[in-house]
Amino acid sequence: MAPAGQGSGRRAAIVTGAASGIGEAISRRFVKEGIDVLSVDLRPGPDTPGVPFAADLTTREGNKAAVEAAVERFGRLDIIVPNAGFQHVAPIPEFDEDRWDALLAILLTSPFLLTKYGWQHLVDSGAGRVCVIASAHALSASPFKSGYISGKHGVLGLVKTIALEGADCGIRANAICPGYVRTPLVQAQIADQAKAHGMTEDRVVSEVMLVRQPVKQMVELDDLAEMAVFLTGPNSNSLTGMSVSMDMGWSAL
């Protein structure tokens, strides 16, 4: 007999940061797979795939509301993909404390709260999946990004803990750690970086942005979304507590 959530109707997912970039690509791919998706963002747009839902994930109320909305709309919750985040760059003596708090709230506390509030629904699924979109910066550090680095390192510990606590009740938890991903936001930075460094756009990509990647290519959104589909699907049952590096060799150095 198939476990609950397998062959007993459409699965349901929450994807955060779903209005653009990685979150949008994953939401769109999930919808294509026949998964019901609550696409959560601070300001979801009219083109956000799935069912757009506005929430401030730096708050407890926002995370709880997202879980409640998914269950109310779809009648179940099988998959949680915490992806929302932002970056703030400054040396530690000058790092704004409010930005530090907000970074840890969105990168670490939100995945915890979504999992906490959704736990029983993931158990009821029989095949609950948590797939955190982390970063190559979850495995290594860079200067001037203390908040982002700390949040991403911390969430890998959370993923391992979810994996251990969920092992006996069908919950599997993993993280994807990409290097630079070809998102509209990253693409928009190339011209500005080229101008600032007095270099061609090709050179600024390989020598500045991707300097730490042996393979001088960006991760494609479709590839990342495909990995998220696999890690949240039935063929990933033996994988839990893992950090999957999609970083073009960054973490091999």
Image (tube, helix red, strand yellow):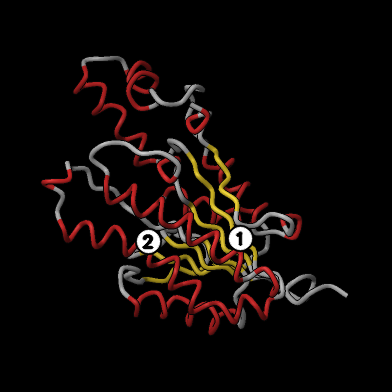
Number of labels in the image equals: 2
What residue type is disc 1 on? Val
The residue depicted at 51 percent of the width and 35 percent of the height is: 247
Q: Secondary structure at mark 1?
A: helix
Residue 80 found in image quarter: bottom right
Q: Is 57 in front, or is 250?
A: 250
Q: Is residue 154 above or below residue 7?
A: above
Mark number, residue 132: none
Mark number, residue 45: 2
Question: What quarter of the picture does the N terminus occupy?
Answer: bottom right
Left or right, 51 with reference to 89: right
Left or right, 143 with reference to 176: left
The residue singled out by tag 1 in the image is 31
What residue type is disc 2 on? Gly
- Label 1 crowd bin: few (<14), some (14–19), many (20+), radius 10 Å: some
Residue 53 found in image quarter: bottom left
Q: Secondary structure at mark 2?
A: loop
Q: Residue furthest left?
A: 94
Q: Is residue 192 above or below residue 58?
A: above
Q: Is residue 224 above or below residue 236?
A: above
Q: Residue 151 appears at what percent x and percent y? A: 36, 55
Q: Residue 191 appears at what percent x and percent y? A: 28, 26
The residue depicted at 70 percent of the width and 69 percent of the height is: 127
Q: Residue 38 appears at what percent x and percent y? A: 51, 69
Spatial distance from mark 1 to mark 2, Cα to Cα? Answer: 17 Å
Q: Earlier in the sequence, mark 1 or mark 2?
A: 1
Q: Residue 18 appears at what percent x and percent y? A: 44, 58
The residue depicted at 35 percent of the width and 27 percent of the height is: 209
